[in-house]
């Protein structure tokens, strides 16, 4: 990943068991199904090249070979959804207050959701209050359309984001 680690020895937590959705009472394939907190946390991304299912909880940390869930950067409780207003907020908690990778983590979450959710959704990515030294600047940067678009034009940043989003094959 990256040399000169900011957090050389992060605490690694157990992954939560994946829950299978069984509520498929609606058989109309053209109807709109509501999206909830669990679905965002477990959002599906089908990679047809590998027939792989990849979830937001599986986004990898840019510095370590662990998922954001394993580092408790993301939890199911950190996801808020208002399906009626087409609004999703994800609040993440960097492992250290001075994490230099917080922008890449937030950008990875945003890109994952942009690729996975219908375009009607407004996506709001936030750093947990008090969890980062430059919290206000990060929140502004991660939610500014022009800044996000400019970041996604940078091939080095896109490569880092794609690496975070690539499946780990555990």
Image (cartoon, grey):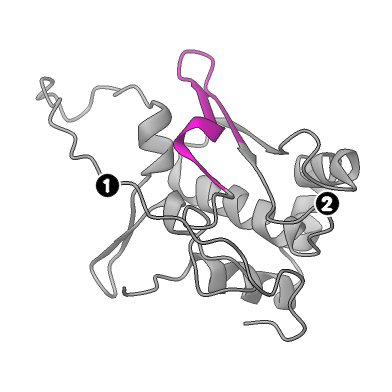
Q: Pointer 2: residues within 10 angstroms few (<14), some, or many (20+)?
A: few
Q: Is residue 163 above or below residue 148?
A: below
Q: Which of marks 1 and 2 is in front?
A: 1
Q: Position of residue 78 (x, y in %)?
A: 55, 34
Q: Pointer 1: residues within 10 angstroms few (<14), some, or many (20+)?
A: few
Q: In this view, does 102 lie above or below 160?
A: above
Q: Where is residue 133 in the image (x, y as percent from the top left)?
A: 89, 48
- Label annotation for residue 147: 2
Quick check: is 89 in the magenta stretch? yes
Say which residue appears at 84% left-offset and 58% top-offset. Answer: 98
**Element on which disc 1 rests:** loop
> Image quadrant for the C terminus?
bottom left
Viewer-nearest residue: 74 or 155: 74
Q: Please, which residue is most extreme toward the bottom here?
A: 3
> Image quadrant for the N terminus?
bottom right
Q: In this view, does 125 lie to the left or right of 82?
A: right
Q: In this view, does 87 lie above or below 143?
A: above
Q: How far apart are marks 1 and 2 (CA)?
A: 36 Å
Quick check: is 5 in the magenta stretch? no
**The quarter of the displayed image where residue 144 is located:** top right
Q: Where is residue 111 in the image (x, y as percent from the top left)?
A: 58, 53
Residue numbers of the magenta segment:
74-90
Q: Please, which residue is most extreme toward the top here?
A: 84
Viewer-nearest residue: 28 or 107: 107
Say which residue appears at 64% left-offset and 73% top-offset. Answer: 63
Say which residue appears at 71% left-offset and 37% top-offset. Answer: 128
Q: Is residue 93 left or right of residue 59?
A: right
Q: Where is residue 44 in the image (x, y as percent from the top left)?
A: 34, 49
Q: Is residue 158 left or right of residue 113?
A: right
- Label annotation for residue 17: 1
């Amino acid at each position: 990943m990256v040399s000169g680690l900011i957090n050389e020895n992060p605490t690694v937590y157990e992954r939560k068991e994946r829950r299978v959705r069984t509520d498929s009472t609606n058989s109309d394939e053209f109807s709109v199904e509501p999206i909830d907190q669990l679905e965002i946390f477990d959002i599906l991304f089908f990679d047809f090249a590998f027939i792989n299912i990849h979830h937001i909880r599986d986004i990898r940390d840019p510095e370590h070979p662990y998922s954001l869930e394993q580092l408790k950067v993301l939890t199911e409780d950190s996801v808020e959804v208002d399906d009626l207003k087409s609004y999703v907020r994800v609040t993440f908690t960097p492992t250290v207050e001075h994490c230099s990778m917080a922008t890449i983590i937030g950008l990875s979450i945003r890109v994952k959701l942009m690729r996975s959710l219908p375009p009607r959704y407004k996506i709001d990515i936030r750093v947990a209050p008090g969890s980062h030294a430059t919290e206000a600047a990060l929140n502004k940067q991660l939610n500014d359309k022009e800044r996000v678009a400019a970041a996604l034009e940078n091939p080095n940043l896109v490569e880092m984001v794609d690496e975070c989003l690539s499946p780990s094959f555990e």
